[in-house]
Amino acid sequence: MLEQGEFADFKESYPQPRVTQDALPYWEAVRNKKLLFQRCPACSGAIFPPRSVCPMCDAGAKPGWEESKGAGSIYSFSVVHRPPSAIWKSHAPYTIGLVRLDEDYFLFAEIEGKPEDMAVGKRVEVNFPDREVPLPTFRLV
Amino acid sequence: MKKPDRSLGRVAAIVGMGDAYADHENVKDPLQLATEATWGAIRDAGIKKDDIDILLTGRAPWADRRPQWSNIFASHLQLPVRMTTELTFHGAGVNAIIGQAALAIAAGVADYVLCVQADAVQLFIDATAVGAATDACPQFEFPYGPTIPTIYAQLACRYMHEFGVTEEDFAEVAVQRQEWAVHHPKAAKRKHGLITVEDVMKSPYISSPLRRWMCATWGPGGTAGAFIVTSVERAAKAKNPIYIRGFGTCTTHEYLCERINLRKSRIPLGPLPAITTTGAAYAAKEAYEMADLQPQDMQIAALAGNFSHTVLVQLEDLGFAPKGKAMDLVRSGRMRPGGDFPVDTNGGWMGFGQPGISVAADSLVETVRQLRGNPLGLKAGNNPKLAMAYSAGGMLACHSAVILGTEKS
Ligand SMILES: [Zn+2]
């Protein structure tokens, strides 16, 4: 039986991404403040999240890595007023949205800026703020 | 995709139903709740425990997440059976076990199948923290600090943007759910009484544009629903059978970051990339085709609306309103108490509340009770004979639609 507080580990520190083998190059690049994504050599489709085989065509091709320019626009967003656990409280309110990158793939990420400035379609650029857990974020241009 | 045999809509029926409830004054864990509901269903069906050949559940309750929970429960009942298994695709699985039971009956591998689900989130765990940890992608979403409402709000944002729907519209959806919930003795939000659009708009944002009243709550404390499924031949001798006329399921993704990056799908989701059409449309179409019925033939419906906007999207995808136009149906008043198309008559996921994964069983319980004319809350005014019971789970990822009726065909 799970008891109250069993998930206390989420409250004590910011959660680390559960890194998959497919995504190791992505996270290595994030540490160097670069944003990578994959592209299929057969169908040329931009692929995200990372895969070992392109899921978008039947070629069975191994995707290659490319650097994103980190520019895109807000597809959707939500301002978090009631965060998931205690550690996020001082950070709230913060905005999390879907960003459509110009290379035509989407990231789910924090969008830095005033909540009242957020709108669908607004241009954003990638940012790599110095935080305990390195993550790419976006900020309004 | 291969079409299911239409005759599957004429092979099985629910002949026993049991429900159980817990709260802070009357604490029960999922094993206790499932046991109580199961014995209620066995008695209602007029069978013996050992008549059960197969036991099906949805995924393990949040309040007791031991793997192989369905087998743990069979063992708890001292019920050796041919098979136990869990349909793990979120809240859809709890609904889809009814169809899987019908398949087992049609295949002749079972005379009686027990379908059961229990949970008691509020009594045992911190649902806000656990929720996002379960439903957000642990690699590309969860590290940013979303809650479940944050993930669902991405759809709310797009739905407003694409169809011109407003926060006040979302508020009206909440008001109508509460109109049913105040009459249900077990509904989590019953105690708040009737509300107005202004009340909803004054409630604080949880994750914009979703305000507190636009979200389901964690409650009631605990629930369970159990269903005994058998053949239509055996059902002919049962005292109050409810026939399984059609069922359909599908799943399109797990995490939102996967769904938004989906560019082609054999399950029709409209032009991609987009998130405002879900697999509910396909699941429902399969169920309607199996039943040889149309959306307009449904006389009552139970949705899986955990937020105002998911109520709207589901009304559209289940065929009750054109895409982007569900608010017209809301405003018509047809779904309110006294209306000719009652929807979410226990208050739905928003008004009755989400006791956990068993919320989908609660909707099935409500549907069976309304068809039998013995609801715990307000009775549908139109004596419904055909019902759509729909459930969903994940970020609108997994879908199951079941059509139930008081007549065999
Ligand atoms: Zn490809």
Image: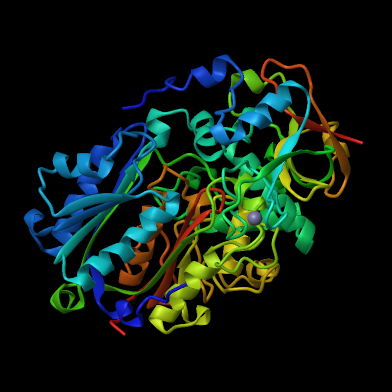
Number of dots carrying numbers: 0
Q: Is residue A86 left or right of residue B401?
A: right
A31 or B75, nearer to the observer: A31
Task: Name the residue located 27 percent from the left edge and 68 percent from the top edge.
Answer: B103
Q: Is residue B65 above or below residue B46?
A: above
From this viewpoint, is residue B83 visible?
yes
Residue B240: x and y in percent read 22, 72
Residue B188: x and y in percent read 46, 44
Task: Name the residue located 21 percent from the left edge and 46 percent from the top edge.
Answer: B36
Quarter-wise, where is residue B32 in the image?
top left
The residue sitting at the right extreme is A141
Q: Is residue B197 above or below residue B122?
A: below
Q: Is residue A136 above or below residue B90?
A: above
Task: Name the residue located 11 percent from the left edge and 63 percent from the top edge.
Answer: B46
Q: Is residue A63 left or right of residue B6?
A: right
Task: Name the residue located 20 percent from the left edge and 60 percent from the top edge.
Answer: B113
Q: Is residue B90 left or right of residue A65?
A: left
B183 or B321, nearer to the observer: B321
Quadrant of the image containing the C terminus of chain B = bottom left
Q: Is residue A44 above or below residue B372?
A: above
Q: Is residue B290 left or right of residue A47?
A: left
Residue B247: x and y in percent read 39, 70
Residue B374: x and y in percent read 31, 65
Which quarter holds ligand 1?
Answer: bottom right
From this viewpoint, is residue B406 visible?
no
